[in-house]
Amino acid sequence: MKKNTLEQKTIIAFAADHAGYEMKNALIAALPELGDFIALDLGTNSADSVDYPDYANLAAHSILTGKAQLAVIVCGSGVGISIAANRHAGIRAALCTHGLIAKLAREHNDANILALGARMIGVDVAKDCLKAFLLTQFSGGRHENRVKKLG
């Protein structure tokens, strides 16, 4: 994972719609426990209704422009926001429901966005997913050609 050369810390973008607002904030609060990471909060900043594609696009753009190395996106189910993020070439958003999926998404698929469903899993499970996602590296090897075929 490439780190920001100025600060030597990995920047993680966080974005959510209204349904994921509280979970996003809980994950940002938990980030310092996981290591040398900086949170880039892309919103939303309240529980007022917003459109999840807007926040998926912000997260994808933050990675594609190098403002962040990884991202976490949250909506009610995690499905809509992950679909929206995956419309961007070079983005591999993985919808995860437990830590092992998050670990394998990084290790085997080189996922660069963790997608979560705030109405599907609790905050503790989301924190497990975040930990597994951030602390796992892509293993390369036999998975390299498969990931290249994703585009």
Image: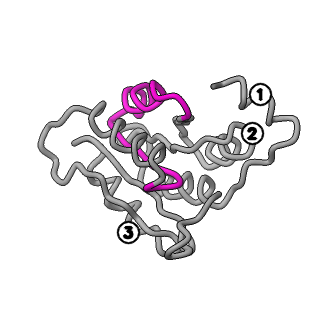
Task: Of the two numbered discs 1 and 2 on the same chain, state the one appearing first in sequence.
Answer: 2
Residue indicated by mark 2: 108
Q: How many marks?
A: 3
Name, please, the residue furthest toward the left: 48
Question: What residue is rendered at 33% in x and 35% in y?
Answer: 76
Task: Of the two numbered discs 1 and 3 on the same chain, state the one appearing first in sequence.
Answer: 3
Q: Amino acid at mark 2?
A: His
What distance separates the C-alpha of mark 2 from that of mark 3?
Answer: 28 Å
Query: Residue 64 or 45: which is nearer the viewer?
Result: 64
Query: Of tags 1 and 3, which is closer to the observer?
Result: 1
Query: Of tags 2 and 3, which is closer to the observer?
Result: 2
Question: What residue is rendered at 41% in x and 38% in y?
Answer: 117
Question: What residue is rendered at 45% in x and 41% in y?
Answer: 116
Helix, strand or loop at label 1? It is: helix
Q: Locate the C terminus by quadrant.
A: top right
Q: How is the image coloured?
A: one colour
User: Is residue 81 located in the magenta-colored stretch of the structure?
Assistant: yes
Q: Point out residue 77 in the picture as x, y percentages from the top left corner.
A: 38, 32
Query: Of tags 1 and 2, which is closer to the observer?
Result: 1
What distance separates the C-alpha of mark 1 from that of mark 3?
Answer: 35 Å
Residue indicated by mark 1: 146
Badge 1 vs badge 2, beta-carbon distance below 8 Å: yes
Q: Quadrant of residue 80?
A: top left
What residue range appears in magenta?
67-90
Residue indicated by mark 3: 29
Name above or below for residue 87 compared with residue 7. above
Q: Point out residue 57 in the picture as x, y percentages from the top left corner.
A: 35, 36
Please indicate whether residue 139 sits to the left or right of residue 81 in the image. right
Q: Amino acid at mark 1?
A: Arg
